[in-house]
Image: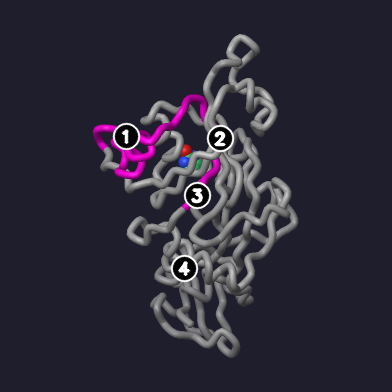
Amino acid sequence: MRLDKFLAESDIGRRKKVRTYIKEGMVKVNGDVITEPAIEINESSDVVEYLGKAVAYTGKVYYMFNKPRGYITARKDAINKTVFDFFDNVNMNGVFHVGRLDKDTEGLLLLTNDGDFEHQLMYPQKHVEKTYFFWALGSLDEQDREQLGQGIYMGKDEMITKPAKLEVQKSGMYKEFKHEMPIDNLCNIDSNHYNQSVVAGYITISEGRKHQVKRMLKAVGCYVVYLKRASIGGLFLDESLKKGQHRFLTEVEIQKVLGK
Ligand code: URA
């Protein structure tokens, strides 16, 4: 195994960081300073030290997390609680989130210490599909579905989006769906607005631009009020995980999400 990979999978830091540590002479292998990140080592017999301390190989970890709304997808935040606050008694050194969900978005979030895994899922050219369930104010018709399917122009400095797939599940007046909508206080909608049209469904995108689903739906006249990521690639959120809970991915799930 490569030395930089060994260190990245041993709680020392992400691949980019550990390469710097190696180049700066902070790492020894069997007593010798090594400055070449790509050197091959034997993880069971070689002794690797970082800043004079032996490094124990932890291996790769992959978590599925059911993100609740209200939490920032980041390790630390000066004001808000973050998704890492749910991993209090877990050693999260070297672990990072794969992509990001907005503060008010719920659902499937993956965390890992495997940089290659992140790359496979996040690299735009890989076109990994992500499906979201949404509730929005407004309505969606066949023309909107076609427009989303052709790609959306979201601003002058941005390329047209890749095609999105839309599956409308429910559509009607707020008064009909009020009790099904998973949000308590729907942005000032009171009984005077019972005739506001609402729509729910699934949208599948294969990119990860900032607020992409909200902006794509806004472009076709809908205002998202609830968003939950349901799947990434072929991997679905385990609905037995309560909001804020996590578990390890199984080997089968890791292969599935990578499309293997
Ligand atoms: N698209 C959004 O608008 N928000 C998210 O959190 C994820 C996708």
Kindly indicate the quadrant of the structure image that contains residue 141: top left
In magenta stretch: residue 133 = yes
Q: Amino acid at mark 4?
A: Gly
Q: Which residue is mark 3?
A: 131
Q: Which residue is mark 4?
A: 259
Q: Decide if residue 18 is on the left or right side of residue 194.
A: left
Mark 2 or mark 3, which is nearer the start of the sequence? 3
- Marks 2 and 1 sit apart, C-alpha to C-alpha, by 25 Å
- Marks 3 and 2 sit apart, C-alpha to C-alpha, by 17 Å
Q: Position of residue 138 (x, y in %)?
A: 48, 25
Q: Which residue is mark 1?
A: 154
Look at the image and give the residue range highlighted in magenta: 130-157
- Marks 4 and 2 sit apart, C-alpha to C-alpha, by 30 Å
Residue 170 tag number: 2
Q: Decide if residue 213 is on the left or right side of residue 71.
A: left
Q: Is residue 163 above or below residue 4?
A: above
